[in-house]
Amino acid sequence: MQRREMWLAYMMLAPTFAIILMIVAGPLLANFWISFKPVQLADLRPPAVLMNERMRGNPEAAGDAATLEYRMRNSSQDEEIRDVVVLDEIPEGFTVTELPEGCAVEGMQLTCSLGTVEPRWRDRLSIEGTVSAAYLEADRPERDSEPVVSGDANNILTNFDFTLENFQRIFDADEFWSVLRVTFYYTIFGTGGALVLGLFAAQLLNTSFKGRGFLRGLFLFPYVSPVIAVAFTWLVLFDPFSGTVNALLTKMGVVADPVNFFGQRAIEFSVFGMSFEFPLALTTVIAFEAWRYFPLSFLFILARMQSINSDMYEAAEMDGATPLQQFWYLSLPQLMGILSVLFLLRFIWTFNKFDDIFLLTGGNAGTRTLTVDVYEQGFALSNLGAGAAVAVVVFVVLVTFATLFIKFTPKEEGL
């Protein structure tokens, strides 16, 4: 009985599982498929013969000569199309007098066999004939039927020819490894900054005081605001010519000239005679990332703090423990579980982040990450195969990181 009920439950849930699998696995498998093919943006449409039909000759009376013309071209620049056949209906009132080679008329049905057409092929089919009064009375009867073109072509998206060319291209490029380093730098420091800010905010608002509810709502502002609005606000505040931040820094004498926070790649400085470069634009983007997403960490950490029994804090205070000692030895061990989960989630989300960087810098000034590289390869350079290959690298890195993190991260007791 229990086994039958189990199988019945599986059968009832099978459609749901299938739909979820299609939603999740479908795009993922398609991305892997495209990454092993030299697909350009133009290859999204399979090769086809494009055709334009029109009547030439401007006949004015019954019996006048006219030409039914078909202008055709191969949409592909690289692929031939085999066994091309054109089917159309002869317009009412048009009598065919001469047919080009390969064409035949049966009743009112026109059939033209063109064979194989080469890449970039262009040609015209001219059907000579005369018109009757019925044709002249009708309003452009040649438009009553659309010509149908059939043919067989090699579709790079659906064939089974695979190549490692895309991966070789991205791994051989020096900029890929630079972009990968920037991505890890941005992800690690952006994730860490969001967690640290969230931890401090949660610690601050964990105690009861007047106006705490208002501050909690205010702290959520960066997270709930539209990203395009807050990104534009930061661009205005840090503008080198009219921004408030630069105006304050120059008035206070901190800097002599305005600083282009989002446009300057690095600032050089020396310590003990050694020169260093500080990645200014990337650090500013990381600061934006930490500021925008710390409220999520703040909410989860605060909820976990409020669930901790206060008796042990009272006992520790009676034993003379300082607030810092209470936090380090009591609060932090209790928070390790939620901090681990938040770090994993924020690492994955930040590693995949595209809109923040694209809106702030467009990937310029040393802020180009793998997700921006996916966009530039796939759409700016029209190389969808290379863009998909970079996306596969992102997927592999995140799966590897998540697996190792879950395996080796210590869990909070009771979780």
Image (cartoon, rainbow, N blue to C red):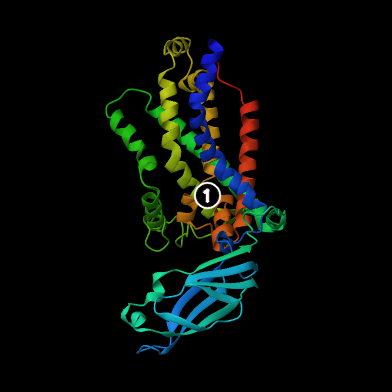
For mark 1, give the secondary structure: helix
Residue 324 seen in the current view? yes
Q: Position of residue 84 (x, y in %)?
A: 60, 69
Q: Residue at x 41, y 13 (%)?
A: 310
Q: Position of residue 124 (x, y in %)?
A: 55, 80
Give the total of numbered labels.
1
The single residue placed furthest to the front in the displayed view is 107
**Mark 1: few/some/many CA within 10 Å (<14, 14-19, 20+):** many
Would you say 50 lies left or right of 159 here? left
Q: Which residue is mark 1?
A: 283
Q: Position of residue 19 (x, y in %)?
A: 50, 36
Relative vertical location of residue 377 with respect to residue 296 in this rendering, above or below: below
Residue 115 versus residue 25: which sits nearer the camera?
Answer: 115
Q: Position of residue 266 (x, y in %)?
A: 57, 57
Q: Residue at x 59, y 58 (%)?
A: 377
Residue 149 appears in which quarter of the rendering? Answer: bottom right
Residue 271 seen in the current view? no
Residue 153 appears in which quarter of the rendering? Answer: bottom right
Residue 200 versus residue 321: which sits nearer the camera?
Answer: 200
Amino acid of disc 1:
Thr
Relative vertical location of residue 217 with respect to residue 374 in this rendering, above or below: above
Would you say 78 lies left or right of 41 here? right
Residue 92 appears in which quarter of the rendering? Answer: bottom left
Residue 372 versus residue 148: which sits nearer the camera?
Answer: 148
